[in-house]
Amino acid sequence: MGRYQVLWTPEKIAKRIAEGRGQGEGPDYIPWLNIRDFSSKGRVHRVRGWKHGRLHHLFSDLEAYAFYEYEPPTMSVNGLLVRITDTREQHPLFPLEETIEIAKDLGVRHPTDPRTKYPVVMTTDLFFTAKRNLTTSYLARDVKYISDLKKPRTIEKLEIAKIYWGRRPAVDWGITTQGEICISLVENVKWMHPYSRLIDLYPLTEHQVSEIALRMTDMVLGRKHPLNLISRSCDEKLGLATGRSLAVVRYLLANQHWEVDLAHRIRTRESLLLVQYSLDSLFQSSNLRLCA
């Protein structure tokens, strides 16, 4: 992350709060910081999320990888299967007075704007809402490269965050490094990501999507041929442009109508092993009808 473009003052913080920064949920959430707030030294990412279609602002490749890892609708967290229903990036640690107090108790310097000398609002990189049965919990993740954890100043700021979130029993706080990221899962999700909505399959009609889904399910279950050959065969049988059936495959996987072991890289030149599938949920969720 580079230098702040914003000059932080009490008035600037009050204005952002009044604008709704760091507040709301789902499509209404506005991150406390966005990529325009920094003169970044690294790569930044704007990613339209699956869950609500909101544009997410991610400040590094590692943040983007962590974001993608939590994009699937369901995943295992601490050994439990949960639904991730919301992702909020750059989540502020409000109120500012609390983190200032924590820093004072720890005997460390609270982050400040070097130009105005005023304390800045600290943020946690990613904040997830997780649901299991009727229980809602939250996951707060600070995303850091392993090399950054060798820096004393980084550790001081993480200690402030640890105590802050530790006071909130419903929140599970942790640090995510590149060592915790499953690269195969991330690459799979990135591959599926552009086709998470029916509209992403345009110009295919709902009728065509349902027919492709049925045919491709039958072909994948019944044959051990590479995925690209099966999808090309489906395109030819239905008179579609090359790649249409493979786009539907990506849609089915993104919405877990087809489930696979995401820890293993999906390669189109190889056969695809379905762990389970449910076309009923596809038709119910998208108002599609079974084709005769």
Image: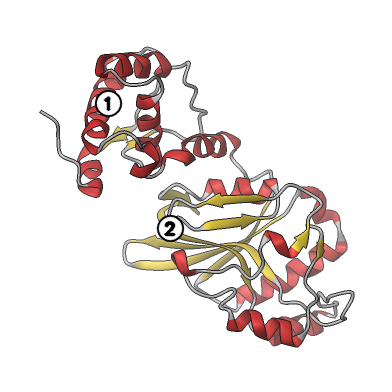
Q: Nearer the viewer, mark 1 or mark 2?
A: 2
Local packing at callout 1 (Cα closer than 10 Å; few below 14, some 14-19, many 20+) is: some
- Residue in view at x 87 percent, y 80 percent: 116
Q: Which mark is residue 288?
A: none
Residue in the foreground of this view, choosing between 52 and 153: 52
Q: Quadrant of residue 196?
A: top left
Pinpoint residue 59: horizontal percent, then vertical percent: 69, 54
Pinpoint residue 145: horizontal percent, then vertical percent: 75, 50
Give the CA distance from mark 1 to mark 2.
27 Å
- Residue in view at x 37 percent, y 30 percent: 249
Q: Quadrant of residue 182?
A: top right
| Position of residue 213 in the picture relative to residue 5 (left or right) | left
Give the amino acid type for the residue marked by disc 1 in the picture: Thr
The residue under label 2 is 52
| Position of residue 231 in the picture relative to residue 284 (left or right) | right
Instruction: Kindly state the secondary structure of the residue where label 2 is placed.
Output: loop
Q: Are marks 1 and 2 in contact (CB under 8 Å)?
A: no
Give the amino acid type for the residue marked by disc 2 in the picture: His
Name the quarter where the N terminus is drawn: bottom right
* Residue 12 shows up from this direction: yes
| Position of residue 45 in the picture relative to residue 187 (left or right) | right
Q: Quadrant of residue 8?
A: bottom right
The residue under label 1 is 217
Pinpoint residue 207: horizontal percent, then vertical percent: 21, 34
Residue in the foreground of this view, choosing between 118 and 153: 118
* Residue 79 shows up from this direction: no
Name the quarter where the C terminus is drawn: top left
- Residue in view at x 36 percent, y 37 percent: 202
Instruction: Kindly state the secondary structure of the residue where label 1 is placed.
Output: helix
| Position of residue 235 in the picture relative to residue 261 (left or right) | left
Pinpoint residue 267: horizontal percent, then vertical percent: 50, 22
* Among the two numbered marks 1 and 2 on one chain, the one whose residue lies closer to the N terminus: 2
